[in-house]
Image (tube, rainbow, N blue to C red):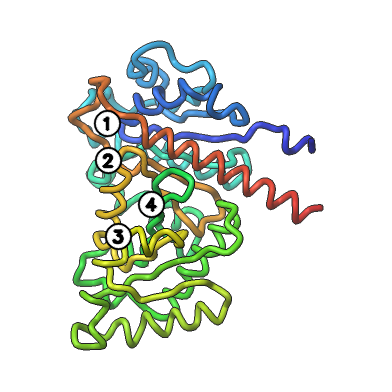
């Protein structure tokens, strides 16, 4: 075995909003680390006292804590804007470590956007912030389930008001998005020939222009250009009928046009075990598919299934990336 292959994968986890479930979910998931991820070493970013207090029992021996001090005491279930910059600092430390090569992948626990905004920092979400901090012009949000052939749904637009979605869709933008999805499914998921099904924007995919022309003027030309580049991207399909087993059985990913077109279906099918992956970055980032669950924080009742799945994905993606790098060097 190559010595580089034998080196443990370095995975870092940001524990997110201190009033939420992130700290306890991280501890619960990492109790499985030695058996489930023996090829990985974990560094957890957060306040040491908070993490050990919220672990429910002893902190998992398989994971190191890199201490970042809270700005103010944190109480489960009660937000405090004084800790908004603390949360952002955890994310900055993880990004810097991944960009420098110290970490092979980042897993993020949920944060509370309002707390960061209330701390005086404009913030729309993990996805947009990661793109800005890594100088990445376009990233793609993809949520995924688990299993041998998981349901994966990527988004052409992310956190936009519905009234702004149509104007945000362009031929060039959709081609770039499909190129990113195709590349990352090959590079990080080990898929040799990804098949990406693409939805329309309008009901019934526009009904040949009677219910909107975005399919005719933007989406179809983008798909034709993508296919000319060798990307297997059929569509546009009506979103209300696409999410059926007979269509999805041969698909590796669905590209939906906006947030609430694709994600309700994905979350209904996978909630509790789904993950969020940011495609197109120079680093690997996965996340849970749920929020801070303030009502469950500190109760011991929060389910770590999504955190376990996010760590699974981060380890798998990091392993694929390492193998690809060694293949290119050989």
The image shows a total of numbered marks equal to 4
Residue at the (78%, 53%) spot, across then down: 329
Residue at the top extreme, as displayed: 58
Q: Is residue 66 depicted above or below 144 in this figure?
A: above
Residue displayed at 33% across by 87% down: 217
Q: Earlier in the sequence, mark 1 or mark 2?
A: 1
Residue 274 placement: quadrant = top left
- How far is disc 4 from disc 3 in space, using C-alphas? 9 Å
Marks 1/2 in contact by CB < 8 Å: the verdict is: yes
Q: CA distance from mark 1 to mark 4?
A: 21 Å
Whether the residues at callouts 4 and 3 have beta carbons within 8 Å, the answer is yes
> Image quadrant for the N terminus?
top right
Please name the residue that numbered disc 3 is placed on: 262
Q: Which label sits on residue 143?
A: 4
Q: Which residue is mark 2?
A: 291
Residue at disc 1, secondary structure: loop
Q: Secondary structure at mark 2?
A: loop
- Choose mark 3 or mark 1, whichever is in front: 3
Q: Is residue 110 left or right of residue 12?
A: left
Compute the Cα span from label 4 to label 2: 14 Å
Q: CA distance from mark 3 to mark 2?
A: 18 Å
Q: Residue at x 27, y 36 (%)?
A: 292
Q: Nearer the viewer, mark 1 or mark 4?
A: 4
For marks 1 and 4, the one nearer the N-term is 1
Nearer to us of marks 3 and 2 is 3
The answer to whether 242 is drawn above or below residue 289 in the figure is below
Residue 245 vs residue 17, the one in the foreground? 245
Mark linked to residue 228: none
Residue 20 numbered tag: 1
Which callout, 4 or 3, points at the residue further toward the start of the chain?
A: 4
The image position of residue 229, as x and y in percent, is: 57, 78
Of pointers 3 and 1, the one earlier in the residue sequence? 1
């Amino acid at each position: 075995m190559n010595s580089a292959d034998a080196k443990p994968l370095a995975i870092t986890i940001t524990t997110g909003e201190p009033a939420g479930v992130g700290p306890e979910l991280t501890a619960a998931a990492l109790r499985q680390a030695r058996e489930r991820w023996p090829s990985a070493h974990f560094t957890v970013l957060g306040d040491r006292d908070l993490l050990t207090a919220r672990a429910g029992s002893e902190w998992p021996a398989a994971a190191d804590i890199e201490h970042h001090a809270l700005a103010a005491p944190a109480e489960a279930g009660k937000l405090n804007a004084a800790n908004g910059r603390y949360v952002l600092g955890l994310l900055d430390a993880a990004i810097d470590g991944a960009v420098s090569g110290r970490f092979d992948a980042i897993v993020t626990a949920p944060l509370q956007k309002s707390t960061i905004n209330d701390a005086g920092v404009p913030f729309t979400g993990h996805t947009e912030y990661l793109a800005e901090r890594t100088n990445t012009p376009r990233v793609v949000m993809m949520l995924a389930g688990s299993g041998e052939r998981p349901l994966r749904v990527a988004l052409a637009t992310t956190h936009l008001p519905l009234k702004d979605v149509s104007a945000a869709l362009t031929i060039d933008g959709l081609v770039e998005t499909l190129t990113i999805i195709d590349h990352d499914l090959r590079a990080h998921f080990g898929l040799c020939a990804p098949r990406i099904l693409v939805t329309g924007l309008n009901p019934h995919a526009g009904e040949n222009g009677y219910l909107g022309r975005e399919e005719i003027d933007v989406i179809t030309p983008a798909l034709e250009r993508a296919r000319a580049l060798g990307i297997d991207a059929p569509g546009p399909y009506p979103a209300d009928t696409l999410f059926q087993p007979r269509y999805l059985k041969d698909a590796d990913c669905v590209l939906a046009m906006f947030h609430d077109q694709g994600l309700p279906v994905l979350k209904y099918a996978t909630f509790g075990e789904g993950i969020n992956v940011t495609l197109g970055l120079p680093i690997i980032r996965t996340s849970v598919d749920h929020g801070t669950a303030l009502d469950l924080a500190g109760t011991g009742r929060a389910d770590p299934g999504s955190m376990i799945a996010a760590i699974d994905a981060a380890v798998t993606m990091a392993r694929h990336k390492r193998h690809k790098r060694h293949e290119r060097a050989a």
